[in-house]
Image: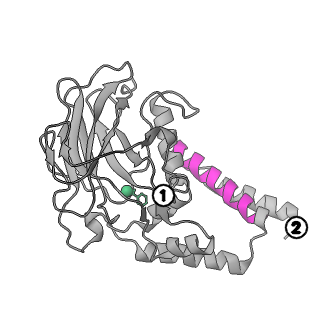
Amino acid sequence: MSEYNQEKLTQDVLAAFAGTPDPRLRQLMTALVKHVHAFAREVDLTSEEWLAGTKFLDATGQISTERRPEFILLSDTLGLSMMVVSLAQARASGNAKGATEATEATVEGPFYWPGAPDMPLGSDIAEGIPGEPAFYMGRVTDLDGKPLAGALLDVWSGDGDGKYDVQLSDTPTMRARGRFRTDAEGRYWFWSIRPTYYPIPDDGPVGAMMRATARSINRPGHIHMQVSAPGHVMLTTHVFVGNSPFLHEDAVFGKRDSLVVDFDAHPPGKAVDGREMKKPYHSASFDFRLAPTPA
Ligand code: BEZ
Ligand code: FE
């Protein structure tokens, strides 16, 4: 096909979508066609490569279940999920460049499980699970530093072996999850374990892609938090462990420097909340700043 005909093909396809009634869908489909055609032309895509690509997408669909969303993992490992997170946060803060005074957001990941138990401040969400104990504390405020009382923290974590409850069986029992409400000064505190780095699920097509491209499949240690308060934009983020391996090669590009926290090491003894610790433990302090809901 001559270059002229390639260009005409692209124009014909665009014209076919031109009557899409929903303007946003029309915009999305038009841009998609332009970029996909430009991609094929840029790399001079062969029939074999095109077929391999379709088989890869078939396999991605075939392995996917509600608990195993392989397409989301593909999006995560291509950095698309983080791009969408960044765009959403920029949009909510009215700042198109992505900079924000609110705590930075990061990927939700596949292991969020709604309905974690409500727990009193100071509870241990990780009782009896492998890992070194860690005390978490901080405040939830608005962008002016005003405490947000009654803000909800929905917390989830892998264990000290890097495993989430949902990965341990087909009929998992919830663990290392809990929901906390900040006190009158916007403070929160609870116990869990210090999370360790762990590999993303790599027994499917995304894992094959990561191996073929010699990429690290690991995520640095982190604990997930979803923080919400009335009148404010809900924040989905992580707190990353300061000296964790793979901080500089997060497989899903979710690490943000502003979310990395030093975990202090403590000998056995009385912790700041008065709990008597029989073994060494860690502590981490992190404050969350929520943006107001756009008017
Ligand atoms: C996670 O942090 O739980 C996660 C995020 C993206 C892909 C895999 C795991
Ligand atoms: Fe995680």
As helix, strand or loop, the secondary structure at mark 1 comes to loop
Looking at the image, is 16 positioned above or below residue 154?
below
Q: CA distance from mark 1 to mark 2?
A: 51 Å
Residue 34 visible at all: yes
Looking at the image, is 156 positioned above or below residue 3?
above
Residue tagged by mark 2? Answer: 2
Residue at image point 56% right, 31% down = 96
- Give the left or right position of residue 233, taking residue 18 as reference: left
Q: Report which quarter residue 266 is drawn in.
A: top left
What's under tag 2, amino acid-wise? Ser
Q: Which residues are magenta?
A: 20-41
Residue tagged by mark 1? Answer: 245
Judging depth in this view, the residue of 12 and 47 nearest the camera is: 47
Image location of residue 113, percent across then percent down: 26, 56
Residue at image point 49% right, 30% down = 100
Judging depth in this view, the residue of 205 and 212 nearest the camera is: 212
Determine if the magenta segment contains residue 33: yes
Image location of residue 64, percent across then percent down: 40, 71
What's under tag 1, amino acid-wise? Pro
As helix, strand or loop, the secondary structure at mark 2 comes to loop
**Residue 4: mark:** none
Which dot, 1 or 2, sits closer to the camera? 1
Q: Report which quarter residue 230 is drawn in.
A: top left
> Marks 1 and 2: CB-CB under 8 Å?
no
Residue at image point 49% right, 77% down = 59
Q: Quadrant of ligand 2?
A: bottom left
Which quadrant of the figure contains the C terminus? top left
- Give the left or right position of residue 229, taking residue 124 as reference: right
Judging depth in this view, the residue of 40 and 168 nearest the camera is: 168
